[in-house]
Image (cartoon, helix red, strand yellow):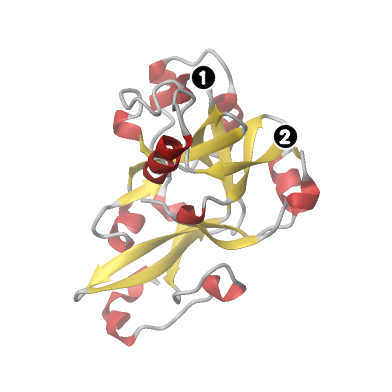
Amino acid sequence: MCFNYSVNQEPEELGKRFDAVFSNRDGFQRTYNAWAFEFPGMPVMVEEDKIRSLEWGLIPFWVKDTEKAETIRKMTFNARAENIFETPSFRVPVRKRRCIVIADGFFEWHHRGGRRYPYYLRLKSGDPFGMAGIWDRWESHDTFSIITTDANSLVAEIHNTKKRMPVILKRATEKRWLSEGLSKDDIKEMLVPYPEDEMEGWPVGRHGDEPEALERVHYPELDEQKKLF
């Protein structure tokens, strides 16, 4: 599952990449390691030409009270592509409120010998990318979830227990993802693993939201798995 990701780019770079403007550029901060359980405000595209901040952890519109909202959002950081149309929290947003979650990398855990090792994954180009997301509005909160799917072969070797990854949209399909009138089949055909030959990953340290979170770390016990580095 995806509980940590980065947006380590300047607003100008993101605006150029997504052909969009920030609704509140002054409120944007580069993020090296956003952690879902802090419910951070992250850059998201709800419309084709605007980037604005939404809170990570979707609260469905039908939630009745604050206590329920705080409970449910801890379970909605990710939405599984396989059952998204049946899950009560997601079945309306996936049809009516799709969004693009902007990122340039994400973190997953590799399990070996009873230990967990963090890895950072990104596109080989280093470019920002759009993850398929859904959003909803509850009271004054606009919140989102990241859609996940089966991992490609690279991510599956790294994230070797859950074997999941966020849905990274192909650049040519981003505007289509935001368009209205898509059928269930139209949506499903975009919820697929990103090509592994266009991605790379390496082990990192256990850091919070700081530049060091993205730096390669050498774990001697993983030397026999150099093909992952």
- Residue 102 or residue 176, whichever sits in front: 102
- Residue shown at 62%/32% (left/top)? 140
**Label 2 element class:** strand
Residue 15 on image: x %, y %: 75, 44
Q: Which residue is mark 2?
A: 50
Classify residue 31 by image quadrant.
bottom right
Relative height, residue 2 to residue 177 (above, below): below
Spot occupied by residue 197 in the image (x, y as percentages of width and height): 43, 54
Q: Nearer the viewer, residue 51 or 187?
A: 51
What amino acid type should be assigned to the residue bearing mark 2?
Answer: Lys
In the image, is residue 129 above or below residue 217?
Answer: above
Whether residue 61 appears in this view of the structure is yes
**Residue at coordinates 45% horizontally, 37% vertically from top-left?**
69
Secondary-structure class at tag 1: helix
Q: Are marks 2 and 1 in contact (CB under 8 Å)?
A: no
- Find disc 1 in the rendering and name its residue: 96
Label 1 neighbour load within 10 Å: few <14, some 14-19, many 20+: some
Disc 1 residue type? Lys
